[in-house]
Amino acid sequence: MDNEVLDTKSRILQEAIAIVGLKGEFTIREVAEKAGVNVASINYYFGNKNNLLKEVENYYSDILYKTQLEILQDDSLSSEDKLKGWAKSLIGFMFESPALIGLIVNIVNEDKSYKPILVQKIYLNSELQDIIQDIIKDGTGITEEKVLKFKYLQFFSGILGPVISRTVANTFGEGKGVFNINSLEDLSEYIEILISGVLTK
């Protein structure tokens, strides 16, 4: 594949990523205009809009996975700081890119056989689960595998909680939720309490 082909495909993908980051949805015509190509070029390189959306999801999933792995494997951090960094990274990503979840749902509705990359790389990723369970094991001294899995589930669910709470509050409660999820101070305090509970034997 020559550089011009790579550049065109890459330019289309980068424009789609930028638009999703800004507003969460796009039309093929909008991406074509921003990338300086015609609609036929997008169909040529990606086949259809859903395939382009899958590439966008892959991009965001890859960034999140690498960021989280880097935090979890940082030997200069304590068990508590690794979990804090991981939690803040995941919550921050979901707050900054809430539309991505909606896009994934739309793709799955269009293509029932599609297995979202974000789910595979983050939630169902046995490597990340094992690392987090080892961190919990180091922080608590717990060795029973079943309890470590429960602790992992407690931790992951605790991270999803604020995201769901914010979505529900913004959608149905005029922004009023259990606590001010948009306050960094409150969110940090919540994460501290969550991790304290996870690291309690």
Image (cartoon, rainbow, N blue to C red):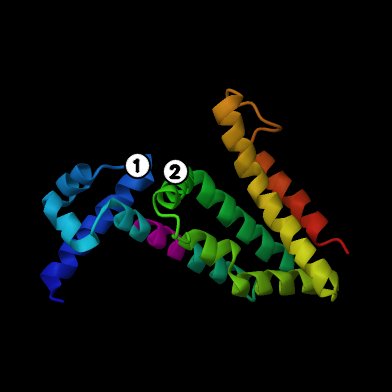
Q: Which residues are magenta?
A: 56-63
Q: Quadrant of residue 59?
A: bottom left
Residue 37 has which mark? none
Q: Is residue 124 left or right of residue 97?
A: right
Q: Quadrant of residue 137?
A: bottom right
In what element is the residue under mark 2? helix
Judging by the rendered image, the residue that carries numbered circle 1 is 25
Q: Residues at badges 1 and 2 in contact (C-beta under 8 Å)?
A: yes
Residue indicated by mark 2: 99
Can residue 9 be found in the magenta stretch? no
Please count the marks in the image. Answer: 2
- Whether residue 168 sits left or right of residue 64 in the image: it is right
- The answer to whether residue 93 is above or below residue 177 is below
Q: Residue at x 58, y 69 (%)?
A: 125
- Left or right for 1, reference 13: left
What type of secondary structure mainly makes up the magenta span? helix
Residue shown at the point (83%, 67%) measured from the top left: 147
Tell me what residue is drawn at x 67 percent, y 58 percent. 84
